[in-house]
């Protein structure tokens, strides 16, 4: 049973560029959430996708956008990259949206913006 | 607003000893869940234990147990018989009204051999 997979593992981009991160949820999960984790801090919620729609969004600018596909996989897009976007981006999946449903995380994508 | 506070940036414990990590939170909900996750150097966030607020009994998962004090809004994690593989960042988390997780700042656990 494959868990949550994220690609790529590492990424280096230049300021102003655009980046796309990918996530495949755990088998049987239909909800995907994205988090940004700065070094030495807890994750910050970016947004959540369910049934191919953005259901919840955290306090992130419109430069951050996403998509969920019919197979439940998801993409996170960041436009006009800033140095402050350098972070670990975590994808988490869960089954539907139930408060007690534990999130299953991937290994993350380390994004470095130079 | 819901908040989660972990006041211990770093803790260290001798291998085979017991350590307790602290977490306090604030919520206006009466029924909710609380989670502890660990994040080893491999970066993957792994669920350690989950507590349902309406249950009086503290959750236990093998060497991991919680001390849940609902009135005090405290949710500490006890690790018994610490092992080298327990070294990681530990995060306390609380679901918001919209079910996204609110995270503490984390506690770095160091295991001394």
Image (spheres, coloured by chain):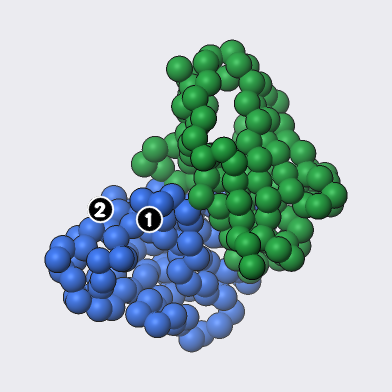
Q: Chain B is drawn in which colour?
A: blue
Chain represented in green: A
Task: Residue A36: name its quadrant.
Answer: top right
Residue A74 percent location from the top left of the image: 72, 44
Q: List the single residue furthest toward the bottom.
A: B57
Closer to the camera, A44 or A34? A34
Q: Mark 1 points at which residue?
A: B40
Relative height, residue B11 to residue A55 (above, below):
below
Q: Secondary structure beneath disc 2?
A: strand
Q: Residues within 10 Å of mark 1 (few under 14, many from 20)?
A: some
Q: Residue B10 carries which label?
A: 2
Residue A29 percent location from the top left of the image: 72, 62
Residue drawn at x 48%, y 72% as measured from the top left: B49
Mark sitting earlier along the chain (2/1): 2
Left/right placement of residue B34 relative to residue B61 reads: right
- The chain holding disc 2 is B
Residue drawn at x 63%, y 26% as measured from the top left: A19
Asked whether residue A57 is in view, the answer is no
Whole-number angstrom distance, CA of label 2 to CA of label 1: 14 Å
- The chain holding disc 1 is B
Residue drawn at x 51%, y 50% as measured from the top left: A107
Task: Residue A44: name its quadrant.
Answer: top right
Left/right placement of residue A46 relative to residue A114 reads: right
Residue under disc 2 on the same chain as residue under disc 1: yes
Q: Residue B78 carries which label?
A: none
Left/right placement of residue B18 relative to residue A85 reads: left
Asked whether residue A74 is in view, the answer is yes
Residue B63 percent location from the top left of the image: 35, 80
């Amino acid at each position: 049973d494959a868990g949550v997979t994220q690609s790529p593992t590492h990424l280096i981009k230049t300021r102003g560029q655009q980046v796309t991160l990918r996530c495949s949820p755990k088998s049987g999960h239909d909800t995907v959430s994205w988090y940004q984790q700065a070094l030495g801090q807890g994750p910050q919620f970016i947004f959540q996708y369910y049934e191919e729609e953005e259901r919840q969004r955290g306090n992130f600018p419109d430069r951050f956008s996403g998509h969920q596909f019919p197979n439940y996989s998801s993409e996170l897009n960041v436009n006009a990259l800033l140095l402050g976007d350098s972070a670990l981006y975590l994808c988490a999946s869960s089954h539907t949206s139930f408060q007690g449903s534990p999130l299953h995380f991937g290994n993350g994508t380390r994004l470095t913006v130079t | 607003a819901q908040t989660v506070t972990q006041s211990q940036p770093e803790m260290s414990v001798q291998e085979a000893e017991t350590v307790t990590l602290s977490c306090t939170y604030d919520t206006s909900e009466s029924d909710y869940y609380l989670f502890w996750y660990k994040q080893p150097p491999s970066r993957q966030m792994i669920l350690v234990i989950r507590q349902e607020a309406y249950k009086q009994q503290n959750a236990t998962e093998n060497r991991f147990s919680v001390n849940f004090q609902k009135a005090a809004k405290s949710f500490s994690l006890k690790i018994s018989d610490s092992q080298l593989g327990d070294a990681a960042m530990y995060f306390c988390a609380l679901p918001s009204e919209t079910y996204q997780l609110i995270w503490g700042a984390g506690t770095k656990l160091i295991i001394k051999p």
